[in-house]
């Protein structure tokens, strides 16, 4: 009985309170536009989706490690996948993340075109997207920010190095990155912009950023153009390492062909120590910490940079041995 009474008293009280609130409402209207208290994200409450494009190079391995390690250190929940260099896999991974209701997506796009539909799906679901590393050709309203390297500038640096290495001009070949990727397109463009007129690009083929594909492409170049090749612009260190194997097999000595490469991985540094690469344009894969900080700012409505470009140098054989032990990737 006693319990019942308490219950009925509570019920009565609640009716009273509700009617009071209801009566009071018109007198002191709550500001109609006031949003419900917005929760502040912390690293511990943030879920980030990272549909990685593949595992094609040492650069990529370091980039994956940077995201996984940073997430582990900060307590971010990271949903990671590997698309094996296939755009359709990246798109399905993104769709799965959207369906799961992640807070934010960081996308390293394998190629530049073809992202509009899935970016729009993310936007409609209220999930901001940060484009990481390579660029996309999509309307800027479809993503929140981009963080990565200026690929055109990397190509320009490579062109300057080739000019210095072949002051009297000569014929060269280009081993390019994945066709249609922002990295390959930008590097090719910047390179051609700065290359001296007395240097002729005999041929350009893709090696898809891998050692395995870089080697046969170089073999074919050597067969076709032989001693005419004075220089090689190679879009990453992994393909350069594959190409060096082909050069060795063809009986060439370090420096016979002047090689300008990109990335600045340990493998690239070792090739400089061994005399095979004459200049290595740095491209920094360690984007995890900056991307997660950016993500938190975006989610919390704080000011953030829509474009963050990584600071990068050019490395040469003379310092390679000294710097190699301190290289992080
Ligand atoms: O140079 C290459 C990797 O997109 C910057 O992709 C990246 C490039 C990098 O496979 O090694």
Image (cartoon, rainbow, N blue to C red):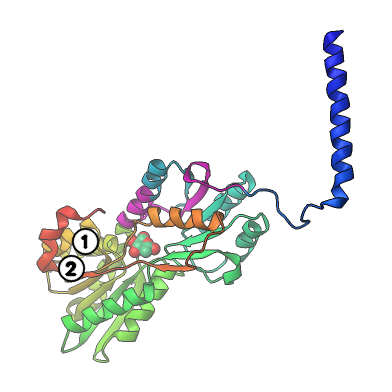
| Residue 280 point in image, percent of width and height | 22, 68
Residue 5 showing in the rendered view: yes
Snapshot quadrant of residue 201:
bottom left
Q: Residues within 10 Å of mark 1 (few under 14, many from 20)?
A: many
Residue 256 forms part of the magenta stretch: no
143, above or below 288, in the image: below
The verdict on label 1 being within 8 Å of ligand 1 is no
Residue 326 on image: x %, y %? 18, 54
Q: Is residue 126 left or right of residue 131?
A: right
- Where disc 2 sits, the SS reads loop
Q: Which of 216 and 150 lies nearest the eye of the viewer?
A: 150
Q: Measured from the top left, where is residue 208 in percent x and y?
A: 38, 63
Left or right: residue 178 compared with residue 169? right
SS for dot 1: helix
Q: Which mark, by number, is residue 277?
A: 2
Mark 2 residue's CB less than 8 Å from ligand 1: no
Q: In this figure, which residue is indicated by the disc labeled 1? A: 268
Residue in the image at 62% along x and 57% along y: 122
Tag 1 near tag 2, CB within 8 Å: yes
Q: Which mark is residue 164?
A: none
Identify the residue at horizontal 23%, vertical 91% (top origin): 198
Q: Nearer the viewer, residue 214 or 24?
A: 24
User: On screen, 189 above or below 114?
Assistant: below
Up/down of 236 relative to 164, above or below:
above
Mark 2, Cα crowd under 10 Å, few <14 / some 14-19 / many 20+, is many
Residue range highlighted in magenta: 39-66
27 displayed left or right of 270 = right
Res 133 → quadrant: bottom left
Q: Residue 4 location, x and y as percent?
A: 86, 13
Quarter of the render that holds ligand 1: bottom left
Alpha carbon separation for disc pair 1 and 2: 7 Å
């Amino acid at each position: 009985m006693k319990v019942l009474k308490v219950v009925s008293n509570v019920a009565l009280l609640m009716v009273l309170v509700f009617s009071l609130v209801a009566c009071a409402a018109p007198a002191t209207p709550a500001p109609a536009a006031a949003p419900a208290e917005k929760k502040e994200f912390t690293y511990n409450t943030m879920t980030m989706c990272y549909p990685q494009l593949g595992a094609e190079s040492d650069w990529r391995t370091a980039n994956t490690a940077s995201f996984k390690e940073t997430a582990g250190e900060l307590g971010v929940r990271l949903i990671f996948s590997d698309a094996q260099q296939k755009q359709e896999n990246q798109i399905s991974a993104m769709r799965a993340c959207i369906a799961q209701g992640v807070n934010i997506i960081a996308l390293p796009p394998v190629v530049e075109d073809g992202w509009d539909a899935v970016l729009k799906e993310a936007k409609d679901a209220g999930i901001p997207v940060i484009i990481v590393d390579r660029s996309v050709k999509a309307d800027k309203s479809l993503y929140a920010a981009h963080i990565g390297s200026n690929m055109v500038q990397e190509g320009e640096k490579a062109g300057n190095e080739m000019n210095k290495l072949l002051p009297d001009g000569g014929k060269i070949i280009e081993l390019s990155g994945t066709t249609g990727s922002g990295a390959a397109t930008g590097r090719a463009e910047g390179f051609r912009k700065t290359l001296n007129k007395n240097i002729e690009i005999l041929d350009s083929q893709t090696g898809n950023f891998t050692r395995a594909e870089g080697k046969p492409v170089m073999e074919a170049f050597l067969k076709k153009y032989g001693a005419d090749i004075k220089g090689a612009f190679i879009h990453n260190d992994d393909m350069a390492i594959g190409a060096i194997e082909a050069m060795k097999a063809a009986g060439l000595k370090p420096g016979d062909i002047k090689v300008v490469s990109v990335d600045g991985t340990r493998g690239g540094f070792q090739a400089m120590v061994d005399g095979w690469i004459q200049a290595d344009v740095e491209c920094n894969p360690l984007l995890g910490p900056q991307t997660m900080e950016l993500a938190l700012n975006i989610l919390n409505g704080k000011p953030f940079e829509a474009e963050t470009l990584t600071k990068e140098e050019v490395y040469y054989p003379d310092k390679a041995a000294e710097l190699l032990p301190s290289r992080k990737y």
